[in-house]
Image (tube, rainbow, N blue to C red):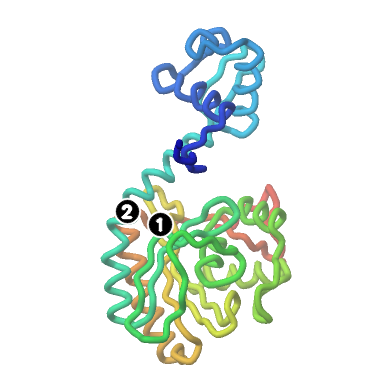
Amino acid sequence: MKAPIRQTERHVEAVLAALDVLECFLEWPVLSTRELIQETRLTRNRVARLAGTLAHRGFLTVEPDTGIFRIGPKMFALGRAFERGRLLLPLARPILRELALKTGESASLYVREGFERVVLAREEGTHAIRHSIAEGQRMDLHAGAAGKVILAFSPAELVETILSRTGLPQRTPATITDKAGLRRELAAIRARGYAVSDGERAVDACALAAPVFEHGGDLAGALALSGPVSRFSPAARRSHAKRLSAAAERLSEALGGKRAAHRSVLGPSGSPPTRRQDHR
């Protein structure tokens, strides 16, 4: 009797064919439809559909006049994400451990994936009662300190796209659910250099977060400390914010990055900047 095939071992033929098309570009930077047919041995119609779909999603680009295909910006973004993950983790883990030991609270590193944030690395605090989340967990960007830091130090156009796509669902009574209020909060975070969350994602949890930058000044992610609200007194917050900001700066320096003058997500009247505005 044959053992059942696990879902992870099943393969989708259309996805494999699309990957065959993409792999052609490992050797050739520019390919025509005819050349893709020769390389993949797929039919013309199938190559046209697959390459057209990949171009529609940004994995390829196509020149309308010639039909020539090239690697698209989404592939570049995935490569950057892969490199950043490989570089970030070994650099971040000792910093997270040090933060957790010195503050007693759980320390986490978050990165943006699409319209959400993901826990890339986590070090548990030393207290018996801790704010419990897991590596790989996905969360909103608008609710919580790390999500707000990611929004605050991201380009204005990206922030507006995220807000228009996701909305601002209420997770707790403290969640910011109006765009104007969130934009004011993001402007305050940029000025202060770190974010605070008082029960915005979980009622009894408090968190602080600071931005981490990579080479070129782009945002790499957010370092955060979190724990029960009862332990985050004003004095504790000031102390934690100082340690957290210093740790985020150290990680940024290790990545070869520093804070860049991104365009503000908040115009002078509390609205997003127009195309002609460039607030730095």
Figure quadrant of residue 54? top right
Figure quadrant of residue 55? top right
Percent of width and height locating residue 272: 69, 58
> What distance separates the C-alpha of mark 1 from that of mark 2?
7 Å
Figure quadrant of residue 62? top right
Relative to 215, is 56 on the left or the right? right
The residue carrying mark 2 is 255
Kindly check if marks 1 and 2 are in contact, taking CB atoms under 8 A apart as contact: yes
x 34%, y 70%: residue: 123
Relative to 174, is 260 on the left or the right? left
Front-most of residues 54 and 63: 54
Percent of width and height locating residue 208: 46, 76
x 56%, y 61%: residue: 151
x 38%, y 52%: residue: 214
Percent of width and height locating residue 98: 27, 73
Q: Secondary structure at mark 1?
A: strand
x 49%, y 34%: residue: 75
The residue carrying mark 1 is 213
- Identify the amino acid type marked 2: Leu
